[in-house]
Amino acid sequence: MKEYLDCISVENMRESDRLTIENYVSGRTLMYRAALGVYKAADWHGNIVIAVGGGNNGGDGYALARILKRRNYGCRIVKLSDKLTEDSGYYAKEAQSLGVPFESYQPGAFESAEIVVDCLLGTGFQGSLREPWLSAVNEINASKAQVISVDINSGMNGDTGEAQTAVCSDLTVTIGYVKRGLVSENAARYMKKLIVADIGIVLAKQEYTICPASEYNQSHGGTVIPAPSYLLLEPVDVHEAELPEGGSVI
């Protein structure tokens, strides 16, 4: 079991992602790995709704829908944005071609869901939520569904864990590395369980280290952080997974 984890800032994550894509692994493969990590981390069942925004966080949701559909799980996409990156557009098209239903967000979109996957906003978000994002997050929090947040709970600041309003998750699967805000006191009230999906991102620089709480000592200094009770120290390892050809999932 890997007992020590790297913990990094949002800017370091952005730079690490860039360096990895430029030198080692395509963004499309990393997006597939992210979705595969989420798939492996959770227990899937029932009526699954994937709430997506624009950008790569939404792309993870489209890639997850592709994996779920190929595994014969029923799911649908609820969109809060039509913006697509090149990679997220690829997976959106793939999911749609497999028959995954797409709909634009309307009030009541999550009422019948047994699982809601939060792919609305990524780690770069700051400030307060605006409509329709605010209404969607409030609806997710009011639903009876199990909630899975991808990378970060939407509405949360990735560096500080602060939020005026954020998704409250049963499980958060953060991608690549733990972001500093996810293990802050601010973040603790928004998540019940946090796990890392190791997708093979090469770290640009080391910043913080998370150690088991039982081993933490004040003498470690400010760069060592005791693991909060909700953090699982064993990552989901998908760092060697390759984007499958011919439609197979694993």
Image: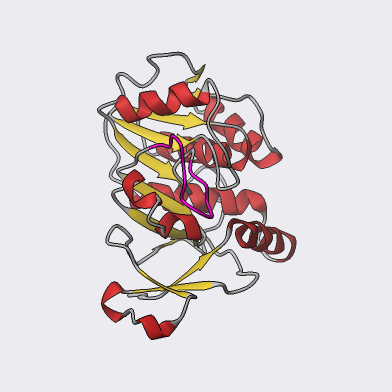
**Residue 230 spot, x, y in % from top left:** 29, 57
Image position of 101 with respect to 231: above or below: above
Q: Which residue occupies the foreground of this view, 39 or 118?
A: 118
> How many labels, in total?
0
**Residue at position x 43%, y 55% in the image:** 182
Image position of 89 with respect to 157: above or below: above
**Residue at position x 46%, y 81% in the image:** 221
**Residue at position x 28%, y 44% in the image:** 43
What secondary structure is the stretch in magenta mostly built from? loop
Q: Which residue occupies the foreground of this view, 250 or 214?
A: 214
Residue 214 forms part of the magenta stretch: no
Image position of 43 with respect to 237: above or below: above
The span picked out in magenta is: 156-167
Residue 157 forms part of the magenta stretch: yes
**Residue 219 spot, x, y in % from top left:** 40, 85
In the displayed structure, does residue 82 sit left or right of residue 215? right
**Residue at position x 59%, y 56% in the image:** 10
Q: Which residue occupies the foreground of this view, 224 or 110?
A: 224
Query: Picture quarter containing residue 8?
Result: bottom right
Q: Is residue 79 visible?
A: no
Question: Farthest right residue?
Answer: 22
